[in-house]
Amino acid sequence: MALDKNGIAQRIAKEVKDGYYVNLGIGIPTLVANFVRDDIQVEFQSENGILGMGPFPFEGEEDADLINAGKQTITALPGASFFDSATSFGMIRGQHVDLTILGAMEVAENGDIANWKIPGKMVKGMGGAMDLVASAENIIVAMMHTNKAGESKLLKRCSLPLTGVGCVTKIVTNLAVIEVTDEGFKLLERAPGVSVEEIQQATEGKLIVEGEIPEMKLG
Amino acid sequence: MIIKTVDNVQEAVNGVKDGMTFMLGGFGLCGIPENAISELVRLNVKNLTCISNNAGVDDFGLGQLLHKKQIDKMVSSYVGENAIFEKQMLSGELDVELIPQGTLAARCQAAQQGFPAIYTPAGYGTEVAQGKETREFDGKMYVLEKAFKADFAFVKAWKGDKAGNLIFKGTARNFNPVMCGSATITVAEVEELVEPGELDPNQIHIPGIFVQRIFEGKNYEKRIEQRTVRQKA
């Protein structure tokens, strides 16, 4: 059975290692924080200017001066710090952030990503996405394998305007875990009950299948 | 000590004219210079270029200037929360330059610190880099981005002293510090203005040298864009 959004987030949470500073994008990536093991040390960065981001505040404790990059009210955990936007993107550009998790509209087999603009539709802007993908060494994309029309989002070449080139390292979808290699999309894991053939059919780009592909373990 | 105080917001924005370029601090509605924006609305200065990460919402923040069609051009990284903005952009009334958020901060900081331009990897290989100089350093490609030039920077801090020293609070800091000293005149509004010596020099985020005018703002609304809470267990 294909994963839902929480399932994707739960699988990605296993990529978050002890000692990591992690930037989470808006959407499915935000859910990842709910599934990270509590016996490891991790700090979440939000690019508007906080390290050590905590959960949403209790009702009545919201602070207008304390929000995340999605403009949601948040809390700061013990050990948190605040900083200006130049410092924030300095820690991103300077590769001090260990892992970036973000959503995408399309990913190409060479690691290109498109996630900010659909020609002919209202363009809201790229926010911090272009800085994140151009700088981070470890970029995981969280997305559905196909779009609402059923078309593959894992392509030979992106058709939409790019956010960054050759940057995505891993993709976790509702169907599979895929590594982006020099040769193409390498299938690492299948969602529980999903066959390699189903993943192949939903993948337009080159899918590399070597040996037996294990099912994902979420827990 | 050099005193930077002005009596009120009217004095603080003295000299603003049609056609000028302004920097405005804030991320979303967090840390925006509410008093200065209200005064710019009242003065009805027009044909403005505004450099600000976002464009406010329909009836608050920069949305108020957009509502009165005072802005000709916005330079921002994300503008998705504003229907007036969308309408003016689609009709061609409003010119919009979208740039990566880190590049926006870096171009402000370059102006503050005397760098004519900076190289950033952000946007390389995308339409953002079109027409710009690119260069390879150690096997990686970078885009040359120029420092901003602006007439006024309007910033908001939590506390300040009469010498213009500023302290910010929480994530309301965001773009405010990097816009200080990045324009010809920097106007800082603060929630609490104190005498010189009352702020611990060790705790100052922005030294007063980057600020030309400071005043204590009034009636801060500090609107929350996305109120999110969790339930007590």
Image: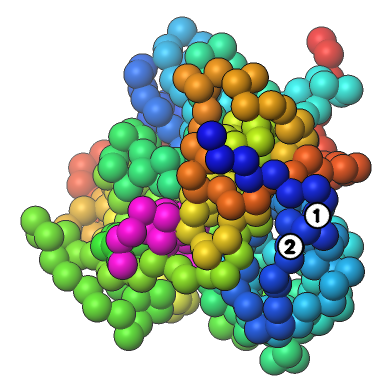
Residue at left offset 48%, top offset 58%: B182
Residue at left offset 33%, top offset 59%: B114
**Residue A165 quadrant:** bottom left
**Residue A30 quadrant:** top right
Q: Position of residue B66 (x, y in %)?
A: 79, 74
Residue to which mark 1 is pinned:
B9
For the record, the magenta segment spans B99-116
Evaluate whether residue B54 shows in this view: yes
Chain letter belonging to callout 1: B
Relative to B174, is A45 on the left or the right? left
Distance CA(mark 2)–CA(mark 1): 6 Å
Residue flagged by tag 1: what amino acid is it? Val
Determine the main secondary structure of the stretch shown in magenta: helix
**Residue B91 against residue B15 in the figure, above or below:** below
Residue at left offset 60%, top offset 74%: B21
Residue contact at pointers 2 and 1, CB within 8 angstroms: yes
Of all residues, the one furthest to the top in this rendering is: A39
Q: Position of residue B92 (x, y in %)?
A: 70, 91
Q: Position of residue B200 (x, y in %)?
A: 55, 18
Q: Nearer the viewer, residue B220 or B8?
A: B8
Q: Which mark is residue B134?
A: none
Relative to B210, is A149 on the left or the right? right
Q: Position of residue B144 (x, y in %)?
A: 28, 70
